[in-house]
Image: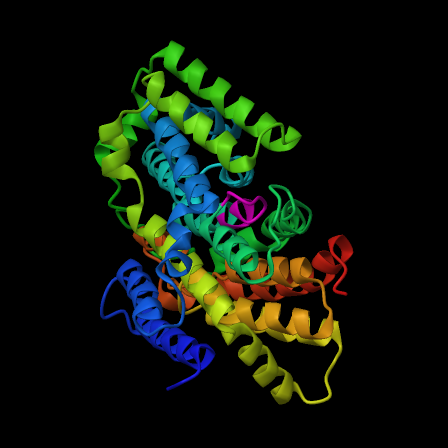
Amino acid sequence: MLDPGITGLIILALMVVLFIWKPIPAPAVGVMGCVLMVLLGVSSFEEAFSGFSSSIVLLMASAMVVGIAMFKTGAAQIIGRMVIRWSHGNEMLFLMTSCAVAGVLSMFLANTAILAAFISIVDSVCRTSPKIKQRNIVLPLACSVMFGGASTLIGCTPQLTANGLMSEMVGIEMGMWDLTGPGLTLFAIFLIYLFFFGYRHGKGIWGGRKAVDMGVDEEKIRSVIEAQFDRKKVTLMLTITVLMILSYITAVIPTALTALVAALLCVILGLCSVDDIQRELDWRTIVFLASCLGLANALTVSGSGEIIGDAVAGMLGDVRSPFVIFSVLVMLTLFISQFITNSTAIIITLPIALSLCSLYGFNHMAFCIGITLGASIACCTPLAAAQITMTQVAGYDFADYLKYCLPLTLICYVGILVAVPLFFPLV
């Protein structure tokens, strides 16, 4: 009979193949992995399915509910109108303002929801202002929500996945703001890049092509331009959002509880209904995250992590430099994330990193944040992340992503190597 650690690695390898091949949905693959961990004696039922009771899953679901309420009450659309007014029809000003606002919002709300709202805004602006072209706006806007979402614990799925894995494997958790220093550094790099180079670079790539119909729901466009919203509900929604952010900052109550209270208030005060949540909540992502946390716990208790660490250490030979190992693992994550979902890339590389940290005495937090950021900034293909995939409505060619995003990616890779050790020493 195989050692539980070896069996766990075989199951993990099967899960990775299925995640990449996609014969069945990713959430089902994750749950299947948890089931196999129990059936093949790698871990107990409670250990393998521990992710479904995780505070991290509750945090993500609650943040999504707040995002749904932001759109239902019209708070998101009103913010979009303000962006339109601030730009005065100037494309560059509209781009920079939209990216800054969307990035900040994505620090606290689901970035795919923010991007969806702004795509409607972009389409409405392009229909009324011939000076503003959709292709010059949509891909940079997706990058902005990607960088903004990577700057807090709740901004996007990858950091919650990474946090859950680290918690299960070594008992360490990221705080709400641990990503903020290096994350905002990358966000600032992106905005500077966009202002001085990216805007003109993009126009040089696709500027002469005919605009396409973005296929955005006309009803959503009208909601941005014409709809009248209940001022009382908008005020309540903005008040809840501000109080939620203040609670995150002051840490008066735990992060997950803060998000849960905010979500409950949205329902109790009628800012969104249970039917809205049932219909619009991203249940696939929630199940996927919960199952991944369960897989990580099962791998930890079975000893699979130690086996991975020993194997990679053997491959590295005499290399003991934390910076070299950090650089290689971040680059590996960044490369893998171009072709598969960033959370899946983290599942592949983070257990290796955490095992090496335990083996050599490196800082688990620094390696976790570096790998998380490496996965989160992948944007060179439309397969890299959900928000990048969404930009295809603007009619970009596959090669456009590589041409536009490769310089940005390389700059940000260097930014990760510099910024993360400044905030979190590697040893």
Instruction: Report whether 7 appears left or right of 276.
Output: right
Q: Which residue is drawn at 43% across and 42% down?
A: 60
The residue nearer to you, when weighing 422 against 287, is 287
- Quadrant location of the C terminus in the rendered image: bottom right
Q: How many marks on residues? A: 0
Reply above or below: 70 against 410: above
Q: In this view, does 260 lie above or below 139?
A: above
Q: Is residue 92 above or below residue 182?
A: above
Helix, strand or loop: magenta stretch: loop
User: Residue 84 magenta-drawn?
Assistant: no
Q: What stretch is highlighted in magenta?
A: 146-155
Q: Quadrant of residue 148?
A: top right
- Residue 132 showing in the rendered view: no
> Residue at horizontal 57%, vertical 76%?
306
Report if residue 106 is visible in the image: yes
Residue at the image point whose x is 41% and y is 35% from the top: 62
In the rendered image, residue 140, in percent from the top left (x then y), is placed at 49, 50
Coloring applied to the structure: rainbow
Left or right: 126 as drawn, with respect to 107: left
In the figure, residue 401 lies in which quadrant?
Answer: bottom left
Tell me where residue 350 appears, x and y as whole percent: 55, 67
193 sits to left or right of 33: right
Give the camera-side residue of 16 and 113: 16
**Which quadrant holds the N terminus?**
bottom left
Seen at 58% across and 50% down, the residue is 194
Asked if residue 152 is among those painted magenta in the image, a careful observer would answer yes
Check the image and name the residue furthest to the top: 232
Q: Position of residue 141 (x, y in %)?
A: 47, 46
Q: x, y (%) of residue 338?
A: 45, 67
